[in-house]
Amino acid sequence: MNSNIILICVVVYFLGLLFIAFRTSRNSDNQSFFIGNRKSKWWLVAFGMIGTSLSGVTFISVPGTVGKLTGTEYVYGGFEYYMMVIGFFLGYFIVAFVLLPLYYKMNLTSIYTYLGRRFNLEAHKTGSIFFIISRSIGATARLFLVINVLQIFLLDQIGIPFWLTTLVILLMIVLYTYEGGVKTIVVTDMLQTTFMLLSLVICIVYVLTQLDMSASEGYAKLAEYNYTHLMNFDGNSATFFLKTLVGGMFITIAMTGLDQEMMQKNISVDNLYNSKKNMLTFASTLLIVNFAFLFLGGLLYLYAMQNGAVYGDGVFGFLNASGEIQNIMGDDLFPALSLQGYFPLFIAVIFIIGLISALFPSADGALTSLTSSFCVDLLKMNENDKISEKEKKKTRITVHLVFTLLFFLLILIFKWINDKSIVYLIMNVAGYTYGPLLGLFAFGILTKRTISLKFAILSVALIAPALTYTINELFIHFTNYKIGVELIVLNGLLTFVGLWLVSNKKQKSLS
């Protein structure tokens, strides 16, 4: 494989992003950075959000879930993951018809401003802090997985160290986002989603061609291997279909509807009607795209088996010179086939472009939204008329660079740990950190009670995840029931109950 050709393609791709950033960031101000001056086209936001939602982890991991062996917790087999995708789809309707109208009615720049108006400043800051923690960990975990794939399969071969790879990628993201913010990434995300989907389609067509099958014949072959089964009917399993369906719905409500990164793009659309169209169009498209990734995953396993891959000792892969199986199962499947000579060079280039196209939308949006939340929610920048626009911009850029440094340090920590299972554990932290947001917003919307005790909201938001963790551990040690994605529902419910216990009946006006 010619690594130099692949690197040249990456450089050309990035230069294209810089050109778009230069064009879109002209005459930008702080409101351009935060909410795109509320002039974003709904169809651009909808299309670009596909890339933001899927991320590089989806590009690598979802195809690998199809053929995972049983015996490990929190894994999928066949098309079981699609039940969660259907749950996502249902959750987007709640976001569109419950949360978006609320955000537009209150004309919010940060969605956590709602908590401040509904309760108090403590609630506002608590919501923002939990978002910052959640998004920082989640975004850097996703970045690490993708950067590590590039490092292991490509850059180690030409002697580029991991820290330099990480630094260069983060600097790339900073260069095209620090000026235009949301105004820029709405356009760049659209471009990157296009490349990601083109990569997906080209890879499916190539593998089908190599297998000498049509799409329908490929699906029928997958069914023979039981790769297309959809529902897990084991009620004790972490992937029981009802748990993944309901859990997926609440994950969407929390990680999209209560997430500043995702909502920052939605509320940049010019009006509520178009924002709803964006959300529902995006939700419908995700059903198709996720199915395509699962279909590709099944085809990749078929391709590997046709070219000599075998199962053995709980792993799946190719025999090496020592007669041992080189595992390419799960997350390693797609990159191994693409970058270790099993696919031709042009597919390797397509894979890298698709992977980077999936990486950047999740990272650029995270940096922008974290900067926005810190400036608007914690520094109260929009409410301070004594500071000039020039000073606000200087502060915003400083915060942007500080979060970039934080991303760099967290990725190096993940590399130091150097264990994929640890990264998945970090990803599951979202169930603990978004749960308090789910409970806090639900309490504000569904009740008229208020909270006057100082530090009561923060205390509940800290105690609820601790109780959730304790309950999860008790289930693991004393029952056969495995808590899966419904962890976030349990956490949100405990937060809701805790808030009820420290609240009173007096209603507070939102005016």
Image (tube, grey):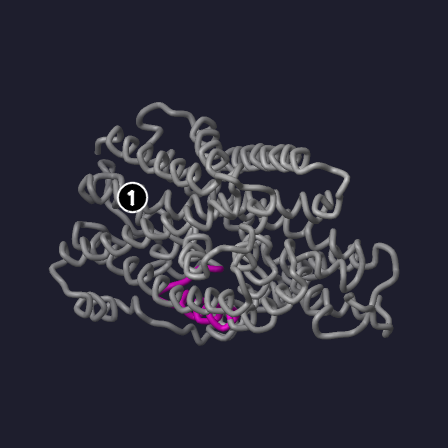
Q: Is residue 449 left or right of residue 231?
A: right
Residue 150 location in percent, x, y? Answer: 36, 37
Name the quadrant containing residue 136.
top right
Observer-nearest of 188 and 361: 188
At 58% across and 66% down in the image, what residue appears?
Answer: 100
Number of marks present in the image shown: 1
Query: Looking at the image, can residue 485 be seen?
Result: no
At 65% across and 64% down in the image, what residue appears?
Answer: 438
Residue type indicated by callout 1: Ala
The residue at the far top in this view is: 159
Residue 84 location in percent, x, y? Answer: 46, 67
Q: Is residue 232 left or right of residue 112?
A: left
Mark 1 lies on a secondary structure that is helix
Examine the rendered structure and indicate whether residue 285 appears above or below residue 44.
below
Q: Is residue 259 left or right of residue 337?
A: right
Name the quadrant containing residue 480.
bottom right
Name the residue tied to disc 1. Answer: 336
Q: Quadrant of the N terminus?
A: top left
Is the residue marked by circle 1 packed among few (<14), some (14-19), or many (20+) residues within 10 Å?
A: some
Q: Which residues are magenta?
A: 74-92
Magenta stretch, main secondary structure class = helix
Examine the rendered structure and indicate whether residue 333 appears above or below residue 219.
above
At 35% across and 23% down in the image, what residue appears?
Answer: 159
Query: Looking at the image, can residue 27 be seen?
Result: yes
Residue 129 location in percent, x, y? Answer: 69, 49
Observer-nearest of 278 and 387: 387
Observer-nearest of 317 and 53: 53
The residue at the far front in this view is: 27
